[in-house]
Each structure stands twice: as C-alpha cells, then as structure tokens.
Image: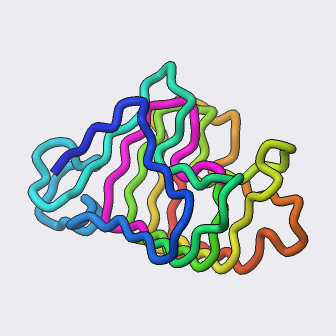
Amino acid sequence: GQYYFGTNRISLTSGPGIKILGSGSVMNDLTSGTVNGLNGTPNATVINAGSSSSATGVFFFSHTASQVTGTEIGNLDIVYSGQGNVFDDLNLQSGYFHDLNINIGSQNSAMAFAALTSETANNSAIQVTFERVTVSSSATARTNPWVMLQSENSGGISDVSFLRCKFN
C-alpha cells in the first residue's frame, strides 16, 4: 500500500526493538516495470513524505532522548520531497536498515544524518548496518552528502556498515 505523511515525521525516541517493516519494496518485486513503486506495483509498500517547503525528515531519532536500540526498518520504498533528511538525527545502537529503495527530491537532503552541532551533541550510530539500500535523487545537483555521520561522543560513530548499497 501507499502511505502519505505530508510534513509529519515518524519519531523514534525511545524503547528497544522498534520495527517498521513493509511487505516489500519495488527492488524486490520482479513483477514490476516501475523504478519508484508508484505505478501500481502490487507488492511494494510506499511511504510518501515531505513537501518542498518542509525541513522535517521522515524518521526522527531524538538527540535529547535515550539511545534507541534494536531498530529495524526494511522492505520499503520511500519517496521524500522535503528539505530535511530521511533518517534524521540518528541516535541508535544495533540498527538494521535493509531492502530500501529511497528517492530524495532535494539536493540538500541526506539519506542518513547525525551532525556535529550543539543541538545534536548526543547523536550516535553504533553497530548500524545498511544492507541492500538504493538511494537516488530527482534533483539535478547535490549540495550535501548522501550520508553525514558525526558525533561529539568518543566512539559515537562506530561499526557502521554499508553492504550492497547503491547511491545514484
């Protein structure tokens, strides 16, 4: 199915074992002739989020809350047209992001973001795996990197793996 979040975001601020799993993404659906899952792909789960004036990301990990552990997000097509980041203010341990087809519409948006600022000083990404994630952009240029991970915490960014991922 397709889910529209508009300018709202999904906040992941506490708790172990948060799982957001779709029925499949278009890259796993061999019956589809589409590239973004929006043209009637029967098995794809599509999240449409953001607007061109919105700086709100899709999934928000609070930098002021406790570190989220055991998060799994997978089997989704994500179409994001906002100015924020798909996985925003990462603050997690033992995260697994897999089988994702992400289309980003803004040249300023990142796929994964944890910045080195006073506001986000508690951000971290420890033992995080991105597997079979395809990221593409409909923007004509890029002004920010696809992935930006920084932390003021010693060892705050460690053991982050990208397996069979594509950035177009």
When asked about the image quadrant of residue 118, the answer is top right
Residue 27 vertical position relative to residue 7 in the rendered view, above or below: below
Where is residue 2? Give x, y as percent: 20, 46
Q: Is residue 5 left or right of residue 57?
A: left
Where is residue 142? Give x, y as percent: 64, 36
* Count of numbered tags: 0
In this view of the protein, which residue sits in the foreground, 93 or 128? 93
When asked about the image quadrant of residue 91, the answer is bottom right
Where is residue 159? Give x, y as percent: 71, 80
Residue in view at x 51 percent, y 25 percent: 54
Residue 108 vertical position relative to residue 15 in the rendered view, above or below: above
Residue range highlighted in magenta: 73-89
When asked about the image quadrant of residue 6, the answer is top left
Q: Is residue 50 magenta?
A: no
Residue in view at x 49 percent, y 50 percent: 11
Farthest residue toward the top? 53
Where is residue 150? Give x, y as percent: 80, 57
In this view of the protein, which residue sits in the foreground, 160 or 94? 94
Q: Is residue 142 left or right of residue 150?
A: left
Residue in view at x 27 percent, y 61 percent: 25
Residue 20, visible in the rendered structure: yes
In this view of the protein, which residue sits in the foreground, 131 or 33? 131
Residue in view at x 65 percent, y 67 percent: 67
Q: Is residue 116 left or right of residue 6?
A: right
